[in-house]
Amino acid sequence: MTVRNQIIGLIRFSYPATEGFAASAMGPDALQAMLYDPARLTARFAYLETLVLPSLAAQTDGDFTCGILAGSNLAPDWQDRLRAMTDRYSFVRPIFLDRMGPLPAAKRAFRRCVDARADHVTGFRLDDDDALAVDYIEKTRDRADRLIAGGFADSPVCVAFTRGLYLDLNDPIQPFHAFREAYAPSLACAMITAPDIPTCIYRYNHRRIASFIPTYLEPGGDEMFIRTQHDTNDSNRAAPPHAQPISTGQGADLLRKRFGVDPAAAFALMPTPPVGAR
């Protein structure tokens, strides 16, 4: 019997969840005012359109769907801008939900993307300001299909790649660092489940997911993700202490070759152009 393993990604785009983020402690009105501030949304769209979507469009395996979850109370003009992305990117599926907890929202969003023919779903997480390597879908499908064929995915199991880059948009001197995470990172990480989505990759803190779900970690090979650092991160992102600095020129080459991202466009996101950019 042929098993159809559907690959689905989910990006939470300024979604006003009731918990799960540092900003969730704010009252509903204050949270909405912060998330939907026009200047902030303009910046988030710039990250999404410059980093995230080009990296997904460049995938060597294009058989996937990526939901973009936003609040149903997002202003119509901004909703229309998300919907318009489907004209250029066939894999995009905008999803607008009322405010609720992060897990119910994520599971509901994943379910809206499930194909009725799927026997398994491999759901990956991605922030709206990060990027995935061009062979991420291809490699994730290969590893997931092997786990399914081997009988390891009868209950949820995770697949994660731990080698990636940190890109600090506020550091023109040393913007790039390379690092191998010691645990499943918050991106380049997926969970194989049944198609009814009994749980999903957003259920657990990524640092502790292997404490609850069997997890395949792959530390070798090429860089598989980019995490950006900038002024509007919800979490306190920073390159780990032992991260390896790499030159701006080398970082630019990786942006282009490994992530399908235009280095000039990425550097234009920085308040100060990086030293050594070419």
Image (cartoon, helix red, strand yellow):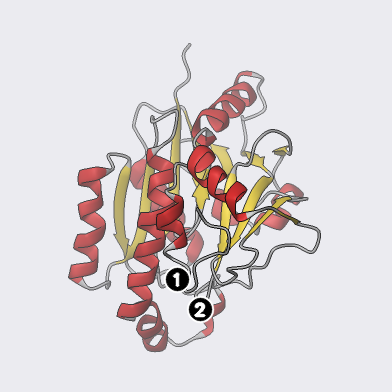
Whether residue 256 is visible, yes or no, is yes
**2 and 1 marks in contact (CB < 8 Å):** yes
Lateral position of residue 274 relative to residue 81, left or right:
right
- Given residues 262 and 74, the one toward you in this image is 262
Q: Which residue reaches farthest top?
A: 1
Q: Residue furthest right?
A: 242
Residue at 44% from the left image edge and 34% from the top image edge: 59
Tell me where residue 173 appears, x and y as whole percent: 63, 67
- At which x and y percent is residue 1? 48, 11
**228 displayed left or right of 244:** left
Q: Residues within 10 Å of mark 2 (few under 14, many from 20)?
A: some
Tell me which corner region of the image, top left, top right, bottom left or bottom right, holds residue 203.
bottom right
Q: Position of residue 60 (x, y in %)?
A: 45, 29
Taking the image as shown, residue 158 lies to the left or right of residue 45, namely right
Circle 2 sits in a helix, a strand or a loop, which is it?
helix
Question: Which amino acid lies under the numbered mark 1 shown in the image of this protein?
Answer: Ala
- The image position of residue 245, as x and y in percent, is 72, 56
Residue drawn where x is 60% and y is 55% of the image: 248
Packing grade of label 1 (10 A; few <14, some 14-19, many >=20) is many
Going by the image, does 178 lie left or right of 273?
A: right
Per the image, the residue denoted by label 1 is 17
User: Which quarter of the picture shows residue 254?
Assistant: top right
Name the disc covering residue 24, or none. 2
Alpha-carbon distance for marks 2 and 1? 7 Å
Is 235 above or below relative to 261?
Answer: below
Query: What is the three-letter code of the residue carrying label 2?
Result: Ser
